[in-house]
Image (cartoon, helix red, strand yellow):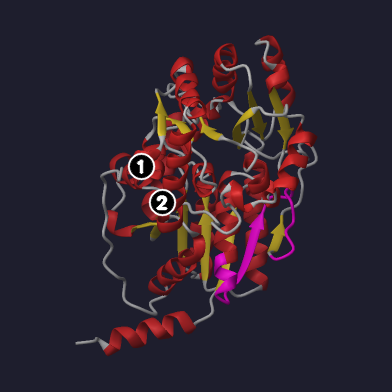
Amino acid sequence: MVDTTEISQLAGQHSRRYRVLMVAPTSFFADYGCHVRILEESRALRRLGHQVTIVTYRNGRDLPDLHIRRTLPIPWRRDYEVGSSRHKIAFDALLGLKTLQVLMGQRFDVIHAHLHEGALIALVLGRLFRIPVLFDFQGSLTEEMIDHRFLRRDSFVFPPLRRLERWIDQSAPVIFTSSSNAERILVRDFGCAPARIRPLPDSVNTADFRPKAEFDAAELAALRTRLGIPQGARVIVYLGLLAEYQGTGLLLAAMQRIRAQMPDVHLLLMGFPDVEHYQQIATGLGIRDRVTFTGRVPYELASLHLAVGDVAVAPKLSLTESAGKLLNYMAMALPTVAFDTPVAREYLGTNGLFAERGNVESLANKLMEPLADPEMARMLGERLRLRAVQQYAWDTLGERIVDVYAQLLGHVPAAPVKHTLATNHD
């Protein structure tokens, strides 16, 4: 028998229009990582008719379809964009003041907070204004600071920061996690109740990120020429931040080994910051002529640039952060190589190519496998594309977010959540 009460509740839930305040303690929009998640979540909600306001740092790129409110600048660090920094304390203080100002001038139904700094601001102000808070968790605060070499585990500030992180995690009424690995971290390391955790995996726009064959061949050829990629070269693509915890130095070292065996291979290294630093490393390794550094690539052009590639790589070393770039690679039907981490296994399943974490030789060997076997590359790419379309498309994500908003606001009863702390490799 059909439960008409439940149907009525769901219908009412999706007819409501929520006013959402997103707190984003970063220089939104900056064409990478968590920024893409914030962007695509906001667009999914707007397509469903909800109002979204994003409060964020002074720096960042404005987007015409989003309502963005920015903090005042700090005079001594006007160019801050990414990474852990002592200057973030000032930025977060200004973000807190800006969020207070916005809340005083406009009514909101829910605060959707990104990252721990955003969650801290939201928890304090949410109690003041009696607005429910949702925490969008994208990795451990302290582990990220260690990955960025901003904090040491034996530092005297590590224990209080860890306690603050635990308090934030345990105080949030509902937490979105981008992966099953993130859920395990919250439960195992920070004592969070599984009932408060809602899986909301990183996803991908599978219409924009699509196989190479669907792009204009002349446009791709022109782009290769502009990028200085030699005619006939096979191309490894990377798109993301350039940093040691992202494995950038290891990737260049692997490219040196690849060139010795496959001299026609070219690396398209797309991202920022520290481009000049890594150009110097490439020069020292004798591979500068086989690496194109693009700097920042606008998100709107990311799929076109990735379509130049034959193989994609994500040598991220972090064991706690998400890895949304993998989903872009998958949707492009690119055979993908990653260091063997729980998140990479979760996203790529059995069709990824996994190198030993931190091992340059293993990374080089895994990258050469699909380059040497086009049929294997094609098969892996097609399977990854199918996996992206079936499991990681943004199309249905907005409704899942709205479901949780409705539960937080008491518009529908909280639904039982099925949790799995085992990584799905299928």
In the foreground, 209 or 1: 209
- Outermost residue toward the left? 1
At a point 46% along the width and 61% down the height, the residue shown is 134
Q: Is residue 47 magenta?
A: yes
Residue in view at x 49 percent, y 54 percent: 203
Say if residue 27 shows up in the picture. no
Span colored in magenta: 44-65
Gap between marks 2 and 1 measured at Cα: 9 Å
Front residue of 188 and 97: 188
Left or right: where does residue 405 sit relative to residue 60? left
Residue 368 makes an appearance in the image? yes
* Marking on residue 203: none
Element under disc 2: helix
> Is 6 part of what is drawn in magenta?
no
Name the amino acid type tagged 1. Gly
Residue 398, percent across and down?
49, 67
The amino acid type found where label 2 is placed reads Arg
- The residue identified by callout 2 is 387
The residue under label 1 is 349
CB contact under 8 Å: marks 2 and 1: yes
Quarter of the image with the N terminus in it:
bottom left
Residue drawn at the location 73% of the way across and 36% of the way down: 224
Of label 2 and label 1, which has the lower sequence position? 1
Q: Which of the 4 image quadrants contains residue 266? A: top right
